[in-house]
Amino acid sequence: MKNVIVTGANGFIGRTLVKSLLEKDYHVVAVDIRFDDELNNDPRIVCVNVLNKALSEIKNSIPKADYSCFFHLAWAGTSGPARADYALQLNNVKLTCDYVQLCKDIGCKRVVYASSINEMETYEYLQSDDIEPSGGYIYGTGKLAAHLMGETVAKMNGIEFIPVIITNIYGVGEKSARMIYTSINKLIHKEHCSFTEGHQMYDFIYLTDAINSIIAVAEKGKAFNRYYIGSGEPKPLREFLLEMRDIVDPEAGIGLGDIPFKGIDISYDQFDLKKVQRDTGYINQVPFPDGIRMTAEYIRSEINGSEI
């Protein structure tokens, strides 16, 4: 049996990654600051609580084994005001480098680092003028810094490092302040949704496709190559939003243009959008309309359950 470590294992993405790894007969060491019963009670999982623990204590809590990959998903402050908390985001950067060092200490030779499309937004902002920074750039700066510093620390210590640049993930099980979940929730409750004009380019990927892509990259990806995790077919945001509206509530009005757009419009030409498919053979399975239908059904079931 192959052994792996997953940080952020109790999060929205982490729990699905752990479940998928177990289905592929991996033995998983789950690392987080808290765990739900599903993780705690599964005999195939070793849960390591890292709350207020030094790196040496974490190392001693990880069973000795031959680990094939370290999936680093843990990141505090991914949404809301915490994205602008520079102390929190700087600590995320340090933690990434510490975990790479931990890999050397326990003999794990490969790290998959989960970064964000916000990293690229921040990079493009730095090359632009006459645009005022928002608090979200502190989060993006943290992701960018952790990518470069973590990768460099890995190279210095003989560790293979693979960054995955994840676009906007959505899907069943999510409860967050991110766009798809909050928008579907508002549409279901007949609340008004406000957006920019939506001319900026965007991309979305359903949760299971993102997870399967990440695992495929861990197994077959090339070290020190970045992999774009998305549908591979970006288009103007308004097209996604109108498609979502038509599926969830065709009669709803949505406020395209309610919010002025003051950010950076990312050029997706900088990504090799088919690199995952070419290097690993994995092809996405869930088109955007199907993913929206499943997510809306999940949110409705959650709402109905809470009303019982």
Image: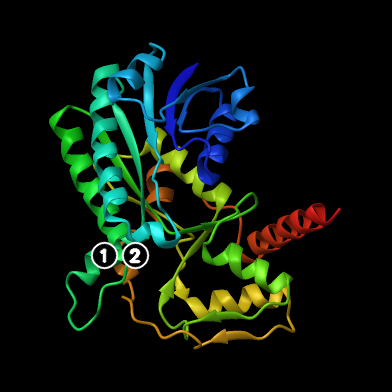
Q: Position of residue 27 (x, y in %)?
A: 51, 20
Task: Check contact, mark 2 vs mark 1: CB within 8 A.
Answer: no
Sort mark 2 into few (<14), some (14-19) or many (20+) by Cα contacts within 10 Å. Answer: some
Q: Is residue 181 above or below residue 256?
A: above
Judged by depth in the image, the label closer to the viewer, 2 or 1, is 2
Q: Residue at x 39, y 56 (%)?
A: 82
Q: How many marks?
A: 2
Q: Is residue 40 above or below residue 248?
A: above
State left or right for residue 41 relative to residue 162: right
Q: Residue at x 44, y 71 (%)?
A: 202
Q: Is residue 20 above or below residue 114?
A: above
Q: How many angstroms separate mark 2 from mark 1 (CA)?
A: 9 Å
State left or right for residue 192 relative to residue 54: right
Q: Residue at x 29, y 24 (%)?
A: 55
Q: Pointer 2: what residue?
A: 136
Whether residue 282 can be seen here: no
Label 1 is placed on what type of residue?
Thr
Element marked by disc 2: helix
Q: Residue at x 73, y 71 (%)?
A: 189
Decide which of tag 2 and tag 1 comes sooner along the chain: 1
Element marked by disc 1: helix
**In this view of the protein, which residue sits in the foreground, 25 or 255?**
255
Q: Which residue is the extreme one toward the top?
A: 64
Q: Pointer 1: what residue?
A: 122
